[in-house]
Amino acid sequence: MKYLSTRGDTTPRGFSDILLEGLAPDGGLYLPTHYPQVDAATLARWRGLSYADLAFEILSLYIDDIPSADLKRLTHATYTEAVFGTPEITPLKPLGDGLYLQALSNGPTLAFKDMAMQLLGNLFEYELGRRGETLNILGATSGDTGSAAEYAMRGKQGVSVFMLSPHGRMSPFQQAQMFSLQDANIHNLAVEGVFDDCQDIVKAVSNDLEFKRRHKIGTVNSINWARLLAQVVYYFAGYFQATKTDDERVSFAVPSGNFGNICAGHVARSMGLPIHRLVLATNENDVLDEFFRTGRYRVRGSAETFETSSPSMDISKASNFERFVFDLLGRDAARTRELFAEGVVRHGGFTLEPAEAARCAGFGFVSGRSTHADRLATIAATWRASGVLVDTHTADGLKVAREHRDAGVPMIVLETALPAKFAATITEALGAQAPVPPRPAALAGLEDLPRRFSVLPVDVGAVKACIEAHAG
């Protein structure tokens, strides 16, 4: 399997090369030359596999430059009950009437990002050891990617992490998770802006090819194909748990800001997984909902990016969205480059031609928007009806999922974090008698630990200087 860029660079690259590279040299995102097709016989063979074995089977379709025995060892070392709390790894929780939560947040940082990041840490360490090289990871986080990356990479041989986050805009729990880490290879950079500023800096550094190669810069954001590929696995795992036969269809509802989580669903559907609808849920930062309703993609500036109670979705420039648009346009790299390298950069967005926008329906996407009042109501209603606590982002997904139900089709809502990370909003939703959201014993007193981070301006040069001073 080889990989190409959404903007036209067709230099053949293997998985291990793009694992360490992040963005393509032309500024595009990597995708496989084709999506391997999964037929009914393969689905039948995969049904009943352990999560680690299912991950091995799916990853093997896209990775042919890591020996099979090594890849299987890596998936089995990653997806264990010890790390994720249950043998199923991502168990379904029925809420009644064909509605399910898929538990993706039982890893070390209580967020779905652990599902891919734990594997990515093991892949990085394996490949760097094989090459005898080092890697400086540069990432941006709106709340959960950063802690998941840092917990996956802390202490890894040959890896240093430089993680940008919007200063003061994460929940207290999220800040404490990241900033309390004292590992020498972890560097937290709090940027005086919003998440999109952080993401823009990461892309600017990655597009400086001389700097990127000199300092061996890689990424863990969902622009890294390996991370998105790891997320494809839990769509198959959820499907097998919600169905009895392989001719049934399911829908997935996904809270989305950066389009990475739901893009993995798009890949699974493109492979042949019987997905009826991919339901995209945004918060008040509704750039993606606006696109799927109108065909217009309009990036918001910092002043128009709202600070909400589902902060990991406070994103107005979806870095993974280019992958879907590339597929939507029939993999027309020139048109994709025109829309993103010119339309977004120069004009702050683009509007698809009517015929282009009409193709969205064929990919199964529908969308909706949730507000603070909606998520409070959803948290309260879910608790009253089922005794299940959900976090604010999952509440956005549940709210929009209920608007797109189809009779006889199970609806799986991807749980994106545990409610312990957003206790203040849980209390606001449920009142003084709200249960205290449980957290693992290892995270008790987290907010009281000493913190280690640097505050930087919204400036590419300042981030480069930090990397130069501390690169491994």
Image (cartoon, grey):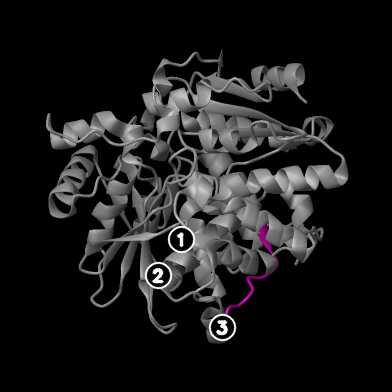
Q: Which mark is residue 88?
A: 1
**SS of the residue under disc 1:** loop
**Magenta span contains residue 281:** no
The answer to whether 42 is drawn above or below residue 112 in the figure is below
Could you tell me which residue is drawn at 43 percent across and 51 percent down? 104
Residues drawn in magenta: 30-39
- Front residue of 110/284: it is 110
Marks 2/1: CA–CA distance: 10 Å
Disc marking residue 154: none
Choose between 200 and 161: the one closer to the eye.
161
The three-letter code of the residue at mark 3 reads: Asp
Question: In the rendered image, which residue does mark 2 sit on?
Answer: 241
Crowding around mark 3 (Cα neighbors within 10 Å: few <14, some 14 to 19, many 20+) is few
**Spatial separation of the CA atoms under disc 1 and disc 3:** 24 Å
Q: Are marks 3 and 2 in contact (CB under 8 Å)?
A: no
- Residue at disc 3, secondary structure: loop
Q: Nearer the viewer, mark 2 or mark 1?
A: 1
